[in-house]
Image: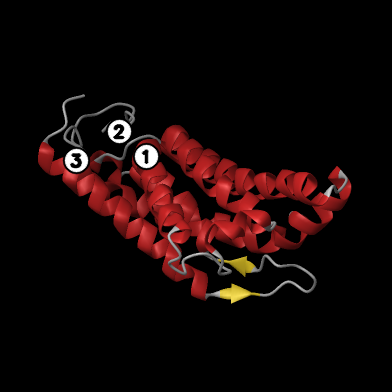
Amino acid sequence: MNVSSKNVRNRYVFAAVFAALIAVSGFFRIPIPGSIVPVVLKNLFVVLSGTVLGSFYGGVAVVILIAAGLLGIPVFVISGGIGVFLTPLGGYIIGYFIAALVAGLVSGLPKVTERKVRPALLIRICAGSFLGFALIDFCGVFYMMFLNSMTFKAALLAGLVPYIPGDAVKFVLSVPLALGLRPIAARYINDNAHNEGEPQQSKP
């Protein structure tokens, strides 16, 4: 797909905007007793970065966030730069990147024609969003198992079960948000935004 230099610039701008939204959303948090990882809105915006921008630029948004955190900018839920990967939060951060890629891969690059929601589009967004949230949680679970030598059951109880209610609410919110934002974003980031058919993946 031929991509104009203006749209490439716009895509990076949108990726930076989503990175900022992910970072700022960390100020909203609900502590979980006995856990270093609180309930946050970060994963909602991570998933949206993929479902709205597509795989590549959704991933870029998370890379910007992680790079800022590693440089010491307080964008993670806890401070510590690279030291955050020595805590259970590290697994969720790795999951952010994977989730954005997969959610975007399933959802595809947005199009202006998506202002009319079709069943196939709705299914893609639902599937991409669900996989995004699930991948974040399971990356956290498996990281806990590795980091703390926990059993799978114990890691599930600590790293997944407490977050299911909140993630369910965020999943319900993520679908209409993605459906509403995709045609808006398409006007700025997709050279073929007005073409009919299935969305294609963005490339640099």
What percent of the width, then of the height, locates residue 77? 56, 68
Going by the numbered disc 1, the residue's amino acid type is: Gly
Residue at the spot of label 2: 202
Mark 1 or mark 3, earlier in chain: 3
**Helix or strand or loop: what does disc 2 sit on?**
loop
Going by the numbered disc 2, the residue's amino acid type is: Ser
Residue at the spot of label 1: 54
Q: Quadrant of residue 31?
A: bottom right
- Can residue 104 be seen by looking at this rendering? yes
How far apart in space, not on screen, are marks 2 and 1 (Cα)? 6 Å
Considering the image in quadrants, where does the C terminus appear?
A: top left
Q: Could you tell whether 163 is left or right of 124 in the image?
A: right
**Helix or strand or loop: what does disc 3 sit on?**
helix
Look at 64% across and 49% down and name the residue there: 91
Q: Could you tell whether 89 is left or right of 196 in the image?
A: right
Mark 2 or mark 1, earlier in chain: 1
What percent of the width, then of the height, locates residue 190? 21, 38
What percent of the width, then of the height, locates residue 189? 21, 43
Look at 19% across and 48% down and name the residue there: 10
How far apart in space, not on screen, are marks 1 and 3 (Cα)? 13 Å
Residue at the spot of label 3: 8
